Amino acid sequence: MAEVLLADVGASHTRLARGTGQGLSPGTTRRYANAGFAGLGPLMAAYLDGTPVDAVCAGVAGPVRAGTAQLTNLDWFIDAAEIARATGAKAVHLLNDLQAQAHALDDLPPARITPLVPGVPDPDGPRMVMGLGTGSNIAVAHRVGDRLFVPPAEAGHSGLPHMGAAENDLIAALGREVAHKPYEAVLSGPGLARLHRLCSGQEQAPDRIIALYETGVPEARETLDLFGRILGTVMGNLALTHMSTGGVFLIGGLARAIAPHFNELGFHRHFCDKGPYTQIMRDMPISLVTDDHAALLGCLQHLRAILK
């Protein structure tokens, strides 16, 4: 494989790196604030500085259709043809950023995976990655022979479930702001801030809410307890839908921030509360991915499968 350009395109920042068949090229990873660029093409052109690459693979935080993508939480429209012109690449591949994360699972160093809940994984079972950051989504990695098959998904905009009285009151209040009541609207960084406002009437940043929780402030504890119940139920629904017996992996800034409090939030009880399928849920290990380069590794793995 000739040198390729890899990108992890989020709502606020983009990571870029060069890669070869041996892995990411040392010393080439850069992180850019998206606000400084009119789109992904100009950002990639600035990174390459006139040096073309053979192929590009970008994991983007939005739905990909027919070689184009619209970021969900940023007004960037990405066109593979435009990226080819900006980079000189002969081939451009776009996939959802969670797909890229799931493609990386086999390449992640063990030190970059932190167990949160033990389990009994099926080594050949599907593995689900759930992102909790500026937005939220999932991707599921299936083994097909010696390759991974990772279909696209936009689960973050599926509706929140029917739950208990407190949760349903919150979901009803959310519906007055976001009519389709997507789970991303509460299970994300901005979602946590919205959840706290709906619960307490107070405007706080997500990191501040977590800090207040850690000092025992009642309003913050109520918010995080509710967050844990909703996250457990939603994540359990998704993991059961996809029979993610190979394990569940959390990624993203919010996932890292809540990880130290994962067990005390009562998340796992709601994750496993699936009637006759409770034991199946208990067997699913849950882990946190802490590798900032995971999506870049996944893009490289995707290109290897296509180009070999």
Image (cartoon, helix red, strand yellow):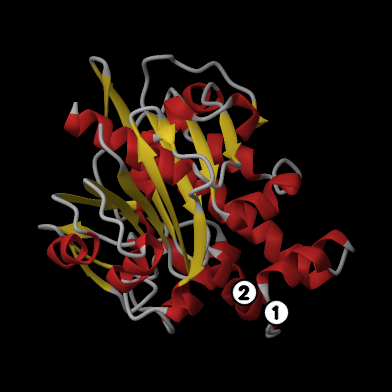
Residue 96: which disc?
none
Q: Residues within 10 Å of mark 2 (few under 14, many from 20)?
A: many
- Judged from the image, the secondary structure of the residue bearing numbered disc 2 is helix
User: Is residue 265 or residue 96 the one in the foreground?
Assistant: 96
Compared with 280, 217 (above or below) is: below
Q: Quadrant of the C terminus?
A: top left
Q: Residue at x 23, y 15 (%)?
A: 145
Q: Are marks 2 and 1 in contact (CB under 8 Å)?
A: yes
Compared with 302, 18 (above or below) is: below
Q: Is residue 159 visible?
A: no
The disc, 2 or 1, on the residue closer to the chain's N-terminal end is 2
What amino acid does circle 1 point to?
Answer: Gln
The residue identified by callout 1 is 204
Q: Is residue 204 visible?
A: yes
CA–CA distance in space, label 2 to label 1: 6 Å
Q: Quadrant of the N terminus?
A: top left
Instruction: Tell me where residue 60 sits by quadrant.
Output: bottom left
Compared with 174, 264 (above or below) is: above
What amino acid does circle 2 point to?
Answer: Ala
Q: Residue at x 60, y 25 (%)?
A: 110
The residue identified by callout 2 is 193
User: Is residue 293 or residue 252 the one in the foreground?
Assistant: 293
Give the residue at the far right of this rendering: 215
Compared with 55, 268 (above or below) is: above
